Amino acid sequence: GCPLYASLPTGLGIANERAYYRAPHSQAEFVLFRADSPLGVLYASARRGSSSAKDWGPIFKTDIPNDDSNIDAGLLPNGSVFLASNPLIGRAGFRQRDPITLAVSDDGSHFRTVGVAMTCEDLGVDACRPRTRTSGNGGPSYPQVVVVSAPAPRALQGVYVSATNNKEDVWVTRLASL
């Protein structure tokens, strides 16, 4: 039921990578789109109380920064929405995607709480450097989140964030709390 990629406006530079979630305690649904452009922001669309792909609202630019890396969003056990992304735009010269953050929203529209989930400091600064000139961006990127909750054993419950480093290595971290 998400908007079809082919139907999106072409002038915005939206990549075919998106994250879908339902707003907590509401019938509102959201899709966040990654922009494949130097603007470094996410785009969004919303709909309420429909299951038709035709009923998605217009695409709008958010104020959520993102360094043209993939994103992930979904619900936490407490009903809040999470957004995992690379919010800092690559630096001039040595381009590095760092850090991976997890933002939290109580209503699905406004992400007011954000924390660092994974950084080059955690991984080791040398681990984040591109291995070759053609490796692209160094640092953790393309985050994905898995929420493990009951009935899993309590020792395994938590929020796990995975990301690739240099598009070669996969790193996983378990967040102690949100």
Image (cartoon, grey):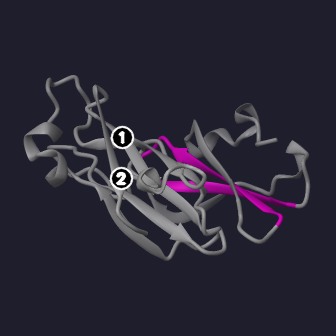
Q: Mark 2 — residue?
A: 174
- Vertical comparison of 174 with 178: above or below: above
* In the image, residue 131 above or below residue 65: above
Question: Could you say whether the residue bearing mark 1 is in a helix, strand or loop?
Answer: strand
On screen, residue 1 above or below 91: above
Instruction: Report the side of 37 relative to 138 (left or right).
Output: right
Q: Residue 95 is drawn in which quadrant?
A: top left
Looking at the rendered structure, the kind of residue marked 2 is Arg
Residue occupying image coordinates x 45% and y 75%: 113
For disc 1, the neighbor class at 10 Å (few under 14, some 14 to 19, many from 20) is many
Q: State how many labels appear.
A: 2
Q: Quadrant of residue 107?
A: bottom right
Relative placement, left or right, of 158 versus 134 is: right
Q: Is residue 47 magenta?
A: yes
Magenta segment includes 88 = no
Q: Which residue is mark 1?
A: 163
Q: Secondary structure at mark 2?
A: strand
The magenta-colored residue range is 27-48
- Note whether residue 39 is visible: no
Choose top left, top right, bottom left or bottom right for residue 137: top left
The residue sitting at 91% across, 54% down in the picture is 50
* Nearer to us: label 2 or label 1: 2
Image coordinates for residue 63, horizontal then vertical, percent: 51, 67
Report the residue that reaches farthest toward the left.
126
Residue 7 drawn at (x, y percent) = 76, 37
